[in-house]
Amino acid sequence: MFRDKIQNSYEELSPRFRILADFILENTLDVGFLTATELARRVGVDPATVVRFSQELGYSGYRELSREIKRYINQQLALRYQKGMTETEGLSAQITSMIDELSDRTLNMKADAEQIAQAVQTIHTAQRIFVTSAAEGYGVATLWSTYLGLLGIETYPIHADYAQAAILLRDIEPDDLLIAISLGLGPGIEIGHLLGAAKERGAHTLSITTSPTLLPARQADINLVASSKTPAGYPSFDTLMAILSLLWQALIAVDTEKSHNSIAAAMHALNDLVEQKDKVPSYDIAALLRLWAQK
């Protein structure tokens, strides 16, 4: 199958072929409807490169590769609409059911576009942004802060415990924005208190919660709800991550040039850090190893 062929030969592919491989794996549904010329235009290569790439994978040309991609898409669509008809049993059958349920939750998620647009505009115009969550959601808050930072948005993750919250409230200003993420694993009382106090100081507040009845949802100026209800009865965070993804993509759309430049600058800085590895003298590395050996 084409996905296996790409993955198995990826290390030997040329840089241009890898660009094609990445695009096909990440946009398989789109590729199924593209001609070689259209695919080449989307990726930024010439059509002959698309043909040679197909031949590199063992196909006679792009037409044969395209036929296999179409068969794969048809199989996936058939599986999507034939729930409960899988031949697999045991854990594989359960996972197949979970995949269907996840697809349903994502497809049926009722996100309010106007509310999201309002949230994006608030993020875009904020002087500084603080992202907070309780212990169980602090990792998500930190991840979201990193993604906002990639777009050049000044962002600070803050734990919702009272000590850090007090420092935040000491420094927060009216043009700042406090974003609170509540996974719904607890009542979110600390987060709610922090949002209420931030509002009293004139700051803007935005909450992303799994229920509109939680205290953080009731305290925020804007609340985006991502239902966590699953057939198993246990709360999930998949729709909440989908909301964060929507916000991320919408923020890029608001200022595409700035977002592109900021991400490119971050990648350039990352390259600089990688290059530092070759500049560090071997005796400095050896000294560090000796320090660890003394512990």
Image (cartoon, rainbow, N blue to C red):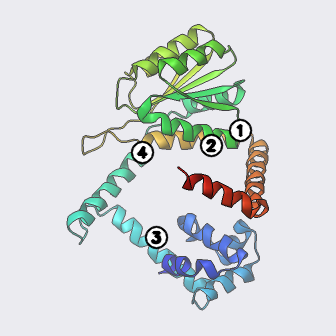
Q: CA distance from mark 4 to mark 1?
A: 25 Å
Q: CA distance from mark 1 to mark 3?
A: 32 Å
Q: Which residue is mark 1?
A: 254
Q: Is residue 202 visible?
A: yes
Residue sitting at the far left:
90
Which residue lies at the image location 59% right of the left edge and 17% below the top edge?
A: 167
- Place residue 127 in its image quadrant: top right
Inspect the image, locate mark 2, and give the three-letter code of the amino acid beneath it: Tyr
Query: Which mark is on residue 238?
Result: 4
Question: Considering depth in this image, is 123 or 141 the residue closer to the camera?
Answer: 141
- Count of numbered marks: 4
In terms of secondary structure, where does tag 2 sit? helix
Of badges 3 and 4, the one in the foreground is: 4
Question: Considering depth in this image, is 96 or 136 the residue closer to the camera?
Answer: 136
Q: Which residue is mark 2?
A: 147
Is the Cβ of the residue at disc 2 closer than 8 Å to that at disc 3? no
Q: Which residue is mark 3?
A: 73
